[in-house]
Amino acid sequence: MASLSEQQFALVVLDIGLPQVDGLQLMRRMLRHYPNLIVLIYTAQEEEVYARLAFNAGASGFVSKGRPMPQLIAAIDGLSQGERSFPDFINLCQQEEVEESLALTPKELQVIGLLSQGLSNVQIAEMLNISNKTVSTHKNTILRKTGAKNLFELAAVYKELQQ
């Protein structure tokens, strides 16, 4: 952040897997202070959920480090010309659909919070006074809406929703 205040940058390439700081949180802070900044997320995280989180957090593009170098160069070139650059599964024409996919109901937010704390379906059912099957249904709906593939990714989504 200090470098951004000392110099002007048009584009920042950022890894969301930084060891000392949450990359998405850092990006949000950058964009709050520099709303015209273009941020390309370049990371080893290939899962769809991370691209969706980056998209919803305001990134202009997302490229996995597992992709060929020409794809990174093409993304930077496109971003410098005002385009956005995301994997095919995030179709920018469907931006509203992506944003709606994270619109969780209050009950789903309760369930995701308890799941992220490591509670089992049975424990959640008892706490919320609902059936185990209902918890399972909420869990599957949350996974579908967020694009998370497992509970670890779901916990990352919940952390993002809390910010």
Image (cartoon, rainbow, N blue to C red):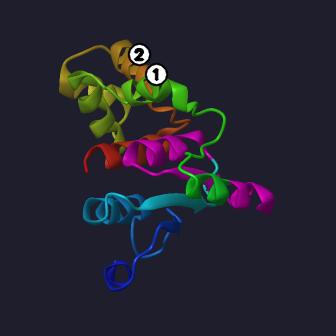
- Name the amino acid, label 1: Asn
Q: Element at badge 2?
A: helix
Quadrant location of residue 108? Answer: top left
Q: Is residue 118 visible?
A: no
Within 10 Å of the Cα at label 2, are there few (<14), some (14-19), or many (20+) other Cα atoms?
few
Q: Element at badge 1?
A: helix
- Name the amino acid, label 2: Thr
Above-or-below relation of 89 to 56: above
Residue situated in front as seen by the camera: 57 or 9? 9
Above-or-below relation of 21 to 160: below
Quick check: 114 left or right of 8?
left
> Split into 4 quadrants, where in the image is the N terminus?
bottom left
- Rendering coords of residue 154 (x, y %): 44, 40
Which residues, given as a range, are shown in magenta?
47-74
- What residue appears at the point 49 percent right and 71 percent down from the top-left corner? 18
Residue situated in front as seen by the camera: 65 or 3? 3
Q: Are marks 2 and 1 in contact (CB under 8 Å)?
A: yes
Within 10 Å of the Cα at label 1, are there few (<14), some (14-19), or many (20+) other Cα atoms?
few
Quadrant location of residue 139? Answer: top left
Residue situated in front as seen by the camera: 90 or 82? 82
What residue sits right under mark 2 in the picture?
Answer: 137
Residue situated in front as seen by the camera: 63 or 83? 83
Above-or-below relation of 147 to 6: above
Tell me, yes or no, whether the highlighted magenta stretch contains residue 51: yes
What residue sits right under mark 1 in the picture?
Answer: 140
